[in-house]
Image (cartoon, rainbow, N blue to C red):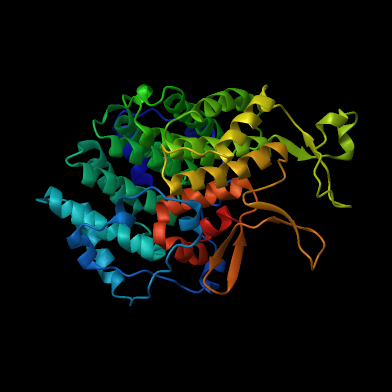
C-alpha cells in the first residue's frame, strides 16, 4: 500500500498529524484491520454473479448504499452458491481496471459493476491482496473525473467494498479529499450521497485517527444542520440521511461523546420535524445512541453521586452493575419525550401505511431507550413465562439456520446498518468469513 502514500504526497496533499505521529493501529474500539485466521473455519455463503442482471440494469447491490427498512435488513435473501470461476474473472477485471487504456465509460461501468458484485458475493481478500493500491488509484480516477454518474457511484462502491475486504491504515489518507470534493462540488445528488457513505466507510475501516473521526463527524453535522445547503444540496433528503447514518456509525467508535452530545442532540431534534420519514428515523436512532452512550457502569471508585443519576430500570438484576448518568444529552428531555411520543402514535394521510408503521415502530423503540437507556431496539416488557424475566430486546439476525446474532444495543444496530449498506446481500458471507466484519459486531 506504499503507492497510496506516494500518490497522496505527489498530489500535494499534506501528511496529517496522524501520519506523522501515529504508532500502531486505530483505537481498540475499532475492528482490527488485519484479517485473523479464525475466518477460515467459517462456512461460505455466496451470491450469484449474474450477467443478465447487469444487462438489465438491475444493479442494486452494486450501486446502492441504502437499506429500505430494519425488517429488510434482518431478513435479507441468502445468496446462492456458485463455483470458483469467479476468481479468474475477478483477476481479469482487476487488470482491466488498472490498465484503463482505451477504455470507455460504458466499459468501465461494466467492469466496476462486476468487481463490486464479486466482492459482495465473495470474501476475496486473498484475491485482491497486493493489488489494493493500484485498484484504489483507478477508482479515484473515476471518482475525480465524474465522467458519468453511474461510473462515479460504482467507483465509490468499489472503493468501499475494497476497504471492508482489505483494510489498511493508509487508505483514508489517500481518499478523504477526493471524496469530500465530490460531496461539496458534484452536481449529482446521488453522487453526493454515495460519497458521504463511502467517506464514512473509509473513515471507519481506512485508518483514520480519533481526531480525524471527530473532524468528519463535525463535517457530517454541518450537512445535517444546514439541511444540505452546506454542500449545495438544500432540502435534498438523500445526502442528509447519508450524513445522519454515517455520523451514527462513526459515533460508535468514540467512547466519550460528552462534548459532542448537546449540540448533536439539538440538530437531531430539529430533524425530527422533517417531512421525510427516513430523515426522522435516522435522527431518532442517533438520539437513542446518544442516550445509550451517556450512561456507564457504576463502580466503587465513583464516590459520591446523585441518586437521581442512577438509572431506574425495572429489570434491575442482582449482581449486575447499575448505570449512572455520565452527562446530560439534551436539556429538554421532557419536551423530547413528548415529540417522540407523538411520532410513535402518528396518524396522518400524508404518509403511506407502510411509512406510518415504520415511524411508529421505530419511535416507540427510541422513546423507550430515552426513558431507559439500557433498553435496546425492539425491547419488549412482556414477561417470559419460562424464565420469569422480561423478554428484553428481541431484534435478531439469523445467520443461515445455525446461529442468531442479537442486536440488543443501539451501537450494534448502527454498525449492522452501516455494514449492510455496503455489503447488501453479501452481509452473511462476510460476517462468516471476513474477520473485519465479524469483529465489528462481536
Residue at point 54%, 49% (across, down): 415
Q: Nearer the viewer, residue 69 or 342?
A: 342
Q: Percent from the top left, x then y, of residue 53?
A: 23, 63
Circle count: 0
Residue at point 62%, 28% (across, down): 261
In this picture, is 100 found above or below 428?
above
Give residue 122's quadrant in the image: bottom left
Residue at point 25%, 43% (across, down): 152
Q: Nearer the viewer, residue 58 or 71?
A: 71
Q: Quadrant of the C terminus?
A: bottom right
In this picture, is 74 found above or below 193?
below
Left or right of residue 411, residue 131 in this image: left
Residue 85, visible in the rendered structure:
yes
Left or right of residue 181, residue 395 in this image: right
Q: Nearer the viewer, residue 18 or 167?
A: 167
Q: Percent from the top left, x then y, of residue 262?
A: 62, 24
Q: Residue furthest left?
A: 102
Q: Percent from the top left, x then y, of residue 268?
A: 53, 29
Amino acid at each position: 500500500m506504499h503507492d497510496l502514500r506516494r500518490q497522496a504526497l505527489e498530489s500535494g496533499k499534506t501528511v496529517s498529524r496522524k501520519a506523522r505521529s501515529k504508532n500502531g493501529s486505530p483505537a481498540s474500539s475499532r475492528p482490527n484491520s488485519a484479517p485473523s485466521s479464525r475466518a477460515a473455519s467459517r462456512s461460505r455463503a455466496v451470491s450469484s454473479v449474474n450477467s443478465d442482471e447487469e444487462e438489465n440494469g438491475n444493479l442494486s447491490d452494486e450501486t446502492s448504499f441504502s437499506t429500505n427498512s430494519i425488517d429488510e435488513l434482518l431478513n435479507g435473501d441468502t445468496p446462492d452458491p456458485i463455483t470458483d470461476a469467479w476468481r479468474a474473472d475477478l483477476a481479469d477485471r482487476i487488470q482491466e481496471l488498472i490498465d484503463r487504456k482505451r477504455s470507455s465509460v460504458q466499459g468501465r461501468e461494466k467492469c466496476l459493476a462486476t468487481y463490486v458484485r464479486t466482492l459482495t458475493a465473495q470474501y476475496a481478500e486473498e484475491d485482491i491482496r497486493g493489488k489494493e493500491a493500484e485498484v484504489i488509484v483507478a477508482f479515484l480516477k473515476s471518482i475525480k473525473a465524474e465522467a458519468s454518474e453511474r461510473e462515479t457511484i460504482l467507483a465509490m462502491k468499489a472503493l468501499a467494498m475494497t476497504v471492508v475486504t482489505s483494510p489498511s491504515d493508509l487508505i483514508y489518507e489517500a481518499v478523504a479529499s477526493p471524496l469530500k470534493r465530490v460531496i461539496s462540488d458534484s452536481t449529482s445528488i446521488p453522487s453526493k450521497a454515495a460519497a458521504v457513505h463511502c467517506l464514512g466507510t473509509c473513515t471507519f475501516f481506512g485508518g483514520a485517527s480519533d481526531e480525524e473521526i471527530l473532524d468528519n463527524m463535525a463535517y457530517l453535522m454541518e450537512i445535517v444542520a444546514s439541511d444540505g445547503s452546506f454542500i449545495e444540496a438544500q432540502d435534498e433528503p438523500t445526502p442528509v440521511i447519508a450524513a445522519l447514518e454515517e455520523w451514527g456509525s462513526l459515533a460508535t467508535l468514540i467512547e466519550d461523546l460528552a462534548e459532542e452530545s448537546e449540540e448533536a442532540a439539538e440538530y437531531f431534534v430539529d430533524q425530527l420535524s422533517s417531512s421525510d420519514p427516513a430523515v426522522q428515523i435516522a435522527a431518532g436512532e442517533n438520539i437513542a445512541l446518544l442516550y445509550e452512550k451517556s450512561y456507564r457502569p457504576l463502580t466503587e471508585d465513583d464516590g459520591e453521586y446523585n441518586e437521581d443519576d442512577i438509572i431506574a430500570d425495572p429489570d434491575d438484576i442482582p449482581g449486575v452493575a447499575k448505570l449512572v448518568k455520565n452527562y446530560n444529552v439534551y436539556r429538554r428531555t421532557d419536551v423530547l419525550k413528548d415529540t417522540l411520543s407523538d411520532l410513535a402514535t402518528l396518524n396522518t394521510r400524508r404518509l403511506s401505511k407502510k411509512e406510518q408503521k415504520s415511524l411508529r415502530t421505530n419511535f416507540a423503540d427510541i422513546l423507550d431507550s430515552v426513558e431507559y437507556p439500557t433498553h435496546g431496539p425492539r425491547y419488549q416488557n412482556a414477561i417470559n413465562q419460562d424464565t420469569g424475566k422480561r423478554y428484553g430486546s428481541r431484534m435478531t439476525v439469523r445467520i443461515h439456520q445455525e446461529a442468531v446474532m442479537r442486536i440488543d444495543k443501539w451501537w450494534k444496530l448502527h454498525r449492522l446498518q452501516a455494514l449492510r449498506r455496503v455489503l447488501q446481500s453479501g452481509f452473511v458471507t462476510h460476517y462468516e468469513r471476513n474477520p473485519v466484519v465479524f469483529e465489528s459486531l462481536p
